Amino acid sequence: MSDSNVNWLAIDSNPKFQALHRKKTFFLWGLMVFSIIYYFLLPIGAAYYQDLFKIKVWGVVNVGILFALSEFIVAWTIAFVYSRKANKEFDAMAQDIINDVNNGRMK
Amino acid sequence: MSSMLKKLILSITALSISGAAFAGNGAVADEFKWMTFTVFGVIIAITMAITFWAARSTHTTSEFYAAGRSVSGIQNGWAIAGDYLSAASFLGIAGLISLYGYDGFMYSVGWLVAYITVLLVIAEPCRNIGKYTMGDILAFRNDPKKTKTVAALSTITVSTFYLTAQMVGGGVLIKTLIGIDYEISVIGVGILMLAYVVFGGMKATTWVQITKAVLLVTASIILVIMVWSPYGFSLPGYLGSVVADPDVQKQVAKLLGDKAATMTPEELGQRFLEPGLFLKNPIDQISLGLALVLGTAGMPHILMRFFTVPTAQAARVSVIWAMGIIGGFYVLTLFLGTGAAMLVGPDKIAAVDAGGNMAGPLLAQYLGGGEQSYMGNFMLAFVAAVAFATIVAVVAGLVLAAASAMAHDIYVGVIRGDHATPKEQVVAARVASVIVGIIAITVGILAKGQNVAHLVALAFAVAASSNLPAVFLTLYWKKCNTTGIMLGMIVGSLTAIGLVMISPNMTYPKAVIAGANKVLNGEPAVPAKEATPAVERSSFMCELFALEGCVLAKPAQAASAEKPAKLGAAEKLAGLNAKLQPLLDELPTMTDVEVRATTEVEIAKLKKDIAAVEKAKAKAEADLKKFEGQTTSIMGLEKPFFLLKNPGLISIPLGFLLVILGSLFTRDKRAEEMWDELYVRQNTGINAEAASAH
């Protein structure tokens, strides 16, 4: 692996690497954009939709409290979804490419 | 080296004993101080043992900066939590919740969401590409000397801002808790942290952070169980009794002022769980949120943690664990804050520390049995010691980050052109740590009494406006190059700093003098006002800058009755004393036990009021003296020109834009040629720095 004569351009243009690149880009951007939008709904809602946030739904627990708690759940879910996808798919695809490089099939 | 370490341990022990001798007033009563010092001593002993053990395997550069890349994912997750949960989040957020309810909780959310950026776009590529510092990542495809210089400067700037806030906050905190003199606290924290970093490098720092995170989480879980279990762990049941608490209702009434007059106690209590008691400006919040969400991923001491794990997979595991711990901790904080509000009372919390920082410690004392009990004071001592461990752990991480930038990027990379022997590199790293440590102690002492709270937000804003755009675009954008990085980082960070210098965070003598005069001389009566319709703001820019001809938005206002004049401090004091004197005279002649008791309560209350007015008067007089003859802030402004407290909304997009423009208008052959290698390596981990064999 400490081979410094790796042909990076060859790997970069290899279909296997391109497939990994496409999948990762699509997936990561999707999660990133969703998480940022969901996060900023909290300060926006707290400032401009106070009537909604004040509605009591569970004893004294109101929409605002539940929404703030949901931010935690959503953040953890995104972390979980990403790590499952990465452990199952991205790591295997990357390992496949590494094996090809080590066997001299991608030079 | 071990004999040096022993001497150091001895001198620290001596320092903590002399600290006990210097101890004046604090939240811990004198007769219970020995408990606090015992718990402090135990924690110092544990961390010193860690340092001693870590020092034996800290010889090479990789061991010093990156703990030999042998930290496991789970361990690193705890260490990240230990590095990140500063005293500000541990004590500060619980305090905000105890004083302002919902807004304090909402504030905590951004600190967790920030880790999504770290997880998705930063952690794994950085592990695959990087070596020891942020400069290494940028130098991969850009001009090494230029980018390492600017990355190191930015790292040192961000770390110094954050470090100053931690040192000053820590000094004040230790003084408030146990009454040790500010200077001694700062020097003590500085020497301890230097011992960890200089002798044990990243390995000792990592384990000190893990220890601290475990202590912090354990303490919080115990407190939350004690607060919540009486309600059978029911959320509505628990919060229902929070909003029914008279202390909480009184606090909301105080915060709402005139508006509270028409509200029932139930409505007042419920208002505690609704937004808007603390965070009034949504645009400012979005600006802060942006700085948090993008800044955390650009914090050098957080980035550095990803070089300590063996693989990118371990880096991923560490962020997942960190998110679990940090998020779980903030959820617990909701209970700590509201519990403190209900059981201790916002009045009492704010009386010890106006920012609410003592909410957690006071709650611990209450739950243990109160001020006079052994258990209560033991629990207070424990929480105080956790706070202390928090400060040293965070400070150690920051010092290591700044020292690595100084030694690895500037000295080895730029001055020696990457030609330094391994031994020279480790010596440089240790010398740089001592230099940064001494700077931290000096700045900490010089900044005594200064308002440094905004420095944390500024550190995040600079990281988000300068470090993140550079790292992100280097990793993901083919056209990114040296010119873009230089331009974006320099302009991004200078804009963030410049905007804060002209923002409401600075001190404006005119406003301070006006406020002091109000306290001393009172305020004239305000005549009755007729109802006014809502006013639309003239443009969005008016929300950001104090431009000429700007009209700010105002909600419609109902007609208000005439408000009476407010008395000045001297008149108030005279009035209170006039009430107090006859009571004091009568007291010895009273025979009825009940009447006597109520009079004594009244006297105590009057005395408390008198003390509060005298304190306010003394502060107002001191302010008047301090700002006598001054009319402008250090930037020569009478009032803020930039109206947000956080500059992120402007400086972050600007940082990104300038990296992009600088890259588009220039060509850099190396940056283009290295793209394939960088992109393949960051995604596959081929040729990544390996863990050192142990």
Image (cartoon, coloured by chain):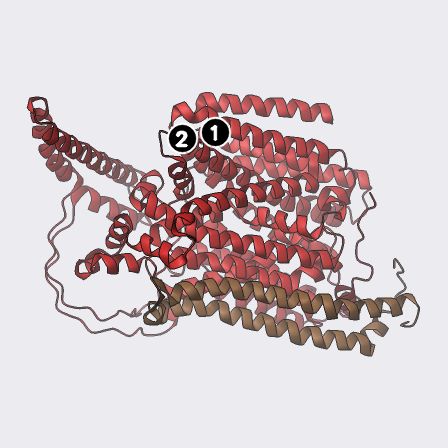
Q: Nearer the viewer, residue B546 or B59?
A: B59
Instruction: Provide residue B324's location: percent of width, then percent of height.
Output: 58, 56
Q: Nearer the viewer, residue A67 or B433?
A: A67
Foreground residue among B663 and B310: B310
State the image coordinates of residue B394 (x, y, percent, origin top left).
57, 43
Residue under mark 2: which chain is it in?
A: B
Q: Secondary structure at mark 1?
A: helix
> Among the chains, which one is red?
B
**Amino acid marked by disc 1:** Thr
Chain in brown in the render: A
The quarter of the picture where residue B643 lies is bottom left
Callout 2–callout 1 Cβ contact below 8 Å: yes
The residue drawn where x is 9% and y is 34% is: B579
In the image, B680: left or right of B570? right
The residue positioned 45% from the left and 55% from the top of the image is: B500
Tell me if mark 1 has few (under 14), some (14-19) or many (20+) residues whose alpha carbon lies within 10 angstroms of its own.
many
Residue B457 visible? The answer is: no
> Tag on residue B36?
1
Q: Helix, strand or loop at disc 2?
A: loop
Residue B60 in view in this figure: yes
- In primary-sequence order, the first of circles 2 and 1 is 2
Where does the C terminus of chain B fall, quadrant-wise?
A: top right
- Give the crowd class for mark 2: few <14, some 14-19, many >=20 residues within 10 Å: many
Q: Measured along the vertical axis of the image, is residue B200 above or below residue B689?
A: above
Residue B34 against residue A62 in the figure, above or below: above
Residue B5 pos. (x, y %): 68, 26
**Cα distance, mark 2 to mark 1?**
8 Å
- What subunit carries mark 1? B
**Amino acid of disc 2:** Val
Residue B182, percent from left and from top: 45, 32
| B607 versus B685 height, above or below | above
Circle 2 residue? B28
